[in-house]
Image (cartoon, helix red, strand yellow):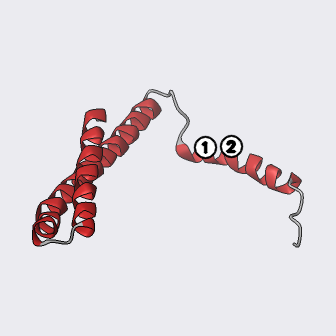
Amino acid sequence: MSKWLRASAVLTLVALAMMVWSVLRPTPLPVMLAMSFGQAVGTAAFGIYGWVVLADLRRIRRDAKRAQELGLAEPAAEAAADIEPAAAEAAATKPPEPGS
């Protein structure tokens, strides 16, 4: 996944460079290239980034599900129940903010 994320970043910088070039030199060639090729490169970079994010989220969910099936992790509801009392206690001991 790391190589895809790097590719997305490089494509994004290439597209950004083309857009900046068309702003700094507003002649027909840079503007046409930025509006066609630059937009295509930027869209491809965004698509690759979205794919990497979705693949990472799927991996995290799959690993959590496997860990729960094997009994290695607490279910989410039980973990949230353990956190809520601690958060309520922390909020109760927090000093009031000035002006409240």
**Residue sitting at x 56%, y 36%:** 74
Vertical arrangement, residue 16 with respect to residue 74, above or below: below
- Relative image position of residue 98 (x, y in whole percent): 89, 67
What amino acid is at disc 1?
A: Glu
Relative side of 70 to 98, left or right: left
* Disc 1 from disc 2: Cα separation: 6 Å
Where residue 78 is drawn, which disc sits there? 1
Q: Nearer the viewer, residue 92 or 24?
A: 24
Where residue 82 is drawn, which disc sits there? 2
Residue 22 occupies quadrant: bottom left
What amino acid is at disc 2?
A: Asp
Q: Are marks 1 and 2 in contact (CB under 8 Å)?
A: yes
- Relative image position of residue 7 (x, y in whole percent): 24, 41
- Relative image position of residue 55 (x, y in whole percent): 29, 43
Q: Nearer the viewer, residue 42 or 25?
A: 25
Residue 5 occupies quadrant: top left
